[in-house]
Image: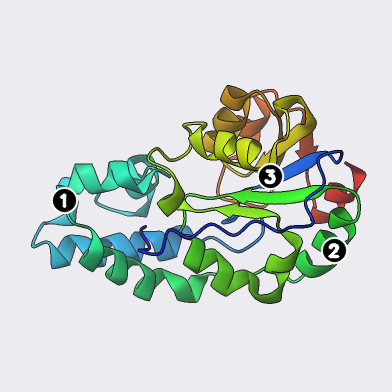
Amino acid sequence: MRWDNHQIYITITTMRDRSLIIFDCDGVLRSASWEGLFKAYLLIAKYLGKDHRGFFKNINEFKKWWNPDWKENNKALGIIDSEATDKIFYSCYEPYLALFPWVPDILKKLSRKYTIAMVTNATDKSVRNSLGKMTEHFSLIAGSEHVKKLKPDPEGVNFILKNLDIHPSEALMIGDMRVDVLAGKNAGTKVGVVSWGLGEWEDLIKLSPDYKFEKPEDLLSI
């Protein structure tokens, strides 16, 4: 979804000689929910005066219809100005979002060795609300308002690489969905996948990622 403040935050302590880890957010560092997404889009369809059954009849059909690039969902629903529907979405979905309890410890340890950044199709505001003081570990967070094209387009990853002046070969993109893998590969970075997100693990493995993280502690093996 969208946020109106396009300010970019870059931590001054970024080091050019450190390798970069780029995290996705939802499903990787904080919870994500098919149920929450489904309910949010039911409310959006109702607000638009449209019968959701013309798009998806149940949550299983919704999973096939839904696109991680929410701009494509807006097009499918005929949304031109998404300000009102953004509010509906987040009012319904935010309660399903929570930072995983292991995140503070693992981020702290990783940030001692690597530069840490984030590319997310969510808004900068939403992510920062969840991260709280954990934002201090991120040199740069690129939300949906910072790019024209969302993942799987590599624009967000390239945005991070350019602003932190890091070569793609020195970067690793970590995500839980196909779009994260494609965004990283199209930008020339290494890619890693996690098993605890929304993506189907078997399908992610078929994309031949460089790293496979079956449990959060595996992130420390990078």
Tell me: residue 147, above or below residue 135: above
The front one of 96 and 85 is 85
- Earlier in the chain: of badge 2 and badge 1, it is 1
Across and down, in percent, residue 191 comes to 70, 32
Across and down, in percent, residue 189 comes to 69, 28
Q: Dot 3, crowdedness within 10 Å: few (<14), some or many (≥20)?
A: many
- Earlier in the chain: of badge 3 and badge 1, it is 3
Q: Which residue is mark 3?
A: 22
Give amino acid for label 3: Ile
Q: Secondary structure at mark 3?
A: strand
Give amino acid for label 2: Lys
Tell me what residue is drawn at x 75 percent, y 71 percent: 101
For the residues marked 3 and 1, what is the alpha-carbon distance in whole angstroms? 31 Å
**Residue 160 horizontal side relative to residue 120, left or right:** right
The answer to which quarter of the image holds residue 157 is top right
For the residues marked 3 and 2, what is the alpha-carbon distance in whole angstroms? 15 Å
Numbered badge on residue 80: 1
Tell me what residue is drawn at x 39 percent, y 43 percent: 69
Q: Which residue is mark 2?
A: 108
Tell me what residue is drawn at x 40 percent, y 64 percent: 5
The answer to which quarter of the image holds residue 209 is top right
Tell me: residue 102, above or below residue 173: below
| Pointer 2 with pointer 1, Cβ within 8 A | no
Q: Quadrant of the C terminus?
A: top right
Across and down, in percent, residue 47 comes to 15, 67
Q: Total number of numbered labels? A: 3
| Pointer 3 with pointer 1, Cβ within 8 A | no
**Residue 220 horizontal side relative to residue 7, left or right:** right
Give amino acid for label 1: Ile
